[in-house]
Amino acid sequence: MHPTRGSRRAGTAALLVCFSVVAAACGGEDSEDDTAFGEDADATVRAEGETLDVWIMEGTNPDAGPFFEDVEAAFTEETGAELNVQFVPWGSAHDQFVNSIAGGTTPDVAEVGTTWTSEFADAGALVDMTGQVEGAGLDGTYVEGLVEAGTYEEGLYGVPWYAGVRSIVYRTDVFEAAGVEPPTTWEELVEVGTTLKEHDPEMIPFPVSNAAFPYLSFVWGAGGDVAELDGETWTATLDSPEALEGTQFYTDLALEHDLSTPAASTWDEAALRDAFAQGDAAMIVSGSWTPGSIIEANPDLEGKIGAFPIPGKDGGLAPSFLGGSHLGVFETAENPDLAWSFVRMMSTGEFAEQWGEESGFFPGTGELLEQIASEDDPLVAPFATQMNEAGASLPVTPLYGQIEGAQIIPAMLQSILSEKVTAEEGLGQANDEMNEIFGS
């Protein structure tokens, strides 16, 4: 999933059933030989006269045209083949994929949102690239959390391309005036928030909203998880003691410690950013792609914004959701080896680095992330550290899209924050609703 775009729409389940049947007919065992990769994943592929059709999501890089002109030139020089890049709007991309899979008209390669990869793999539409990654010596190269999100039933169907992660963005000038430092534990987070509130009662120290991703870091930070896989069945685990501890702490920031406001309980992540940009909030959980855009829209905040990783309960880093995109090779690709050449070119080396620089997202390789973190940019390095050391993924199953579409977690948080239910009651209800979808 593109980290700024939210979850895919509800209703996909019905479409999934539809195109799974079609994909099974066109991409089953009989087609494996037609889409098999060559034995040498590190070989230079020559394919003069051929054209590779690629779909890239529109809008991630605001100036993608010149970038892909350079990619096309390098790709043609290396392979002899032409590159046909089609830009697809994020808003219509999922339906376009669904229709193309059903009709057997998929591209050779495409950018695929991380929460879509398992869905398309389950439908038989994507090719397993495990052998290619290992054969090219790239095993262990990519960021672990992104690899996990691209893995379905032990096969790697999405090679990490780029990603964003959430950490805590804060007002450095406000912290300095209040005499506080970025917290490194949950206890310190409460202490810092309390001091900020005493220093400036008009500013919200830490808005607590019903947005799922900021909240989940506290579940993960307490050692909890959303769900676990037992054999082939997912089971929700929000009713665990660890999930309860994380949920209780997160909601108590508002209900017990008074570090938020009732209005913030309905804010999505865009509203959180707006409140921060307008000077109404001292710190928020926000994405790595946001500080630059906040400063661009509010030049007066230049030099007044910093970031730090989300603290774990007793220190260290709390995991944070890695959102972004994979590159997938579709089973309809006429020349899978040529398709792999493109995936390798885009996901490693200079083009991966250049895309990250131009788009404001991070490349999907650990080496490039470590390089970025070492540059010590106060608005970049903390996110790179968060992503490389404490990235997390959601349950890798097509069913999780239904859970996102049903807004189960935001609805639960809203009920707890409005004190209609206790944290334990809310988690129990959400857990039951998730298990109905999981079928467990």
Image (cartoon, rainbow, N blue to C red):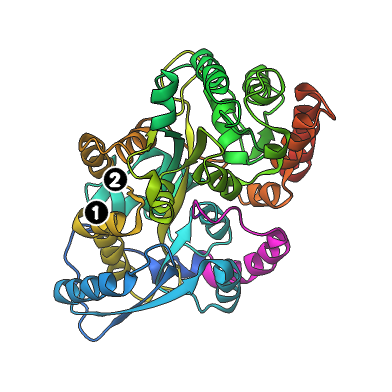
- Report whether 64 appears left or right of 412: left
Q: Amino acid at mark 2?
A: Thr
Whether residue 231 can be seen here: yes
| Residue 38 horizontal/vertical position (percent) | 27, 63
The C terminus lies in quadrant: top right
Whether residue 38 can be seen here: no
Residue 426 in magenta?
A: no
Near-viewer residue (51 or 433): 433
Q: Residue visible at 27% across and 59% down? A: 344
Q: Secondary structure at mark 2?
A: loop
| Residue 322 horizontal/vertical position (percent) | 46, 43
Can you name the residue that lies furthest to the bottom here?
A: 49
Residue 19 in magenta?
A: yes
| Residue 439 horizontal/vertical position (percent) | 75, 42
| Residue at the disc numbered 2 | 365
**Number of numbered tags placed on the structure image:** 2
Tell me where the magenta segment starts and ends, as one range: 2-28
Q: Residue visible at 44% across and 42% down? A: 165
Q: Quadrant of residue 46?
A: bottom left
Q: Residue visible at 69% across and 51% down? A: 402
- Report whether 340 appears left or right of 325: left
Q: Residue visible at 42% across and 25% down? A: 175
Q: Earlier in the sequence, mark 2 or mark 1?
A: 1
The label on residue 353 is 1
Residue 187 position (above or below residue 135): above
Q: Amino acid at mark 1?
A: Glu
Near-viewer residue (263 or 125): 263
Label 1: how many Cα within 10 Å (few below 14, some 14–19, many 20+): many
Measure the alpha-carbon separation of dots 2 and 1: 9 Å
